[in-house]
DNA sequence: TCCTATCATGTAATTAATTACATGTTTTAG
DNA sequence: CTAAAACATGTAATTAATTACATGATAGGA
């Protein structure tokens, strides 16, 4: 993919809640937000530098222990402005790149022997995912208070669960069809 | 995004059914396959050249009218082989880049005034999409025969419809919640 | 006959994103 | 005390993908 650069907004959104280092930001993609967005540190560090040049963020140097230098990034007013402008702007949806769907497209013949094993493998994968997401939801949103304080996050996780459930159902339906 | 290069397999898959020019292949992404995969001619032409060097495809020159030179590409045995190897290989799913979901993630407060207009805009979009997909399905798969001959394609379209329906339902649920 | 849409094929410049390379510090568990 | 895991920050090389640049032919309708 070229351009769009929505990662910029992700970083601003993460910095909106609290000051963080590039390392902290990179870690966010391993857990919660990683469910639907990804980035590695080698993309994040240079982007932070550019964003600082554009005055969307700033940083203060923090020394840990004897020598370790950390950069605590924070969002600026300008950063907040463009973040909220983005939030209010119309969203567009990239088409999903689901490799299984792509493969399926090329199976012309309903009787193809390839079909069944493909579906079963995929089903296993999505069922695991579904379970994992359900566990995650229970852990993160055990109380109504937690839901209210991270409302968007809870909606997004609920959506991911719905999506996986739908996928799973569709796969089951397919197995019946063939 | 960098690498994966599944476009290679898409082109092979398209050439599997019939000989085509780069132009024809590029057009495929405007219609059916474009629902879930994209590519433009400036990516396709160089890739075809590379694929020919790798002996996955070949071409014959066709002259139309007085001077127009077309290149009719066809798949080779080697191309068929790696295509079917790919079909049988395990699939992985890139995470979806849904900008609306991303924005939602950053709405912490259930009472945020941003929420409602965001959802309504999105709902309109997905309902249009759903209608459009339903029309497409009726047009393409009006008879059982047509379904049987393009089985994978029909499953994929059905999946896209399910997905949109699920998305729509989820948006409706959200509106009730807030 | 002329004009426009579609057919047809490329290259260049730029950006996004992944993988690999590179280095050093601090904390924690055994 | 020591080793490993986690913290912390960068750069380089490569590939994927988009947008823009560039050119020309053919078919069909007005």
Image (cartoon, coloured by chain):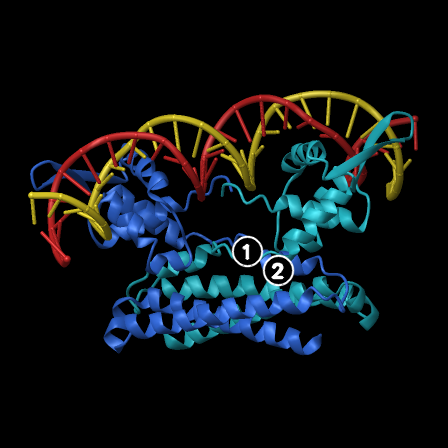
Chain colours: A cyan, B blue, C yellow, D red
Q: Is residue A48 left or right of residue B169?
A: right
Quadrant in which the C terminus of chain B appears? bottom right
Chain assignment, label 2: B
Q: Residues within 10 Å of mark 2 (few under 14, many from 20)?
A: many
Q: Quadrant of residue A110?
A: bottom left
Q: Which residue is mark 1?
A: B96
Whole-percent x, y for residue A1 in the image: 49, 43
Residue at x-position 47% and y-position 66%: A120
Q: Is residue A64 left or right of residue B25?
A: right
Say what secondary structure mark 1 lies in: loop
The one nearer the camera, A1 or A85, is A85
Whole-percent x, y for residue B172 in the image: 60, 76
Marked residue nearer the N-terminal end (1 or 2) = 1
Q: Quadrant of residue A46?
A: top right
Give the vertical position of A54 relative to A153 (above or below): above
Q: Which residue is mark 2?
A: B101
- Whether tag 1 and tag 2 are in contact, CB under 8 A, the answer is yes
Q: Residues within 10 Å of mark 1 (few under 14, many from 20)?
A: some
Q: Is residue B141 left or right of residue A15?
A: left
Give the vertical position of B88 relative to B58 (above or below): below
Chain assignment, label 1: B
């Amino acid at each position: 993919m070229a351009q769009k650069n929505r990662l910029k907004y992700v970083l601003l959104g993460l910095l909106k809640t609290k000051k963080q280092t590039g390392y902290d930001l990179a870690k966010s993609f391993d857990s919660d937000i990683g469910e639907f967005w990804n980035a590695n540190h080698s993309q994040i560090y240079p982007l932070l530098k550019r964003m600082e040049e554009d005055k969307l963020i700033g940083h203060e140097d923090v020394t840990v222990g004897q020598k370790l230098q950390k950069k605590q990034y924070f969002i600026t007013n300008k950063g907040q402005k463009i973040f909220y402008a983005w939030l209010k702007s119309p969203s567009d949806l990239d088409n999903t790149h689901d490799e299984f769907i792509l493969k399926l497209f090329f199976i012309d013949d309903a009787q193809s022997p390839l079909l069944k094993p493909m579906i079963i493998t995929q089903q296993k994968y999505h069922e695991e995912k579904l379970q994992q997401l359900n566990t995650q939801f229970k852990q993160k949103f055990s109380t109504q208070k937690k839901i209210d304080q991270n409302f968007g996050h809870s909606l997004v996780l609920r959506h991911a669960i719905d999506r996986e459930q739908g996928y799973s159902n569709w796969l089951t339906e397919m197995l019946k069809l063939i």
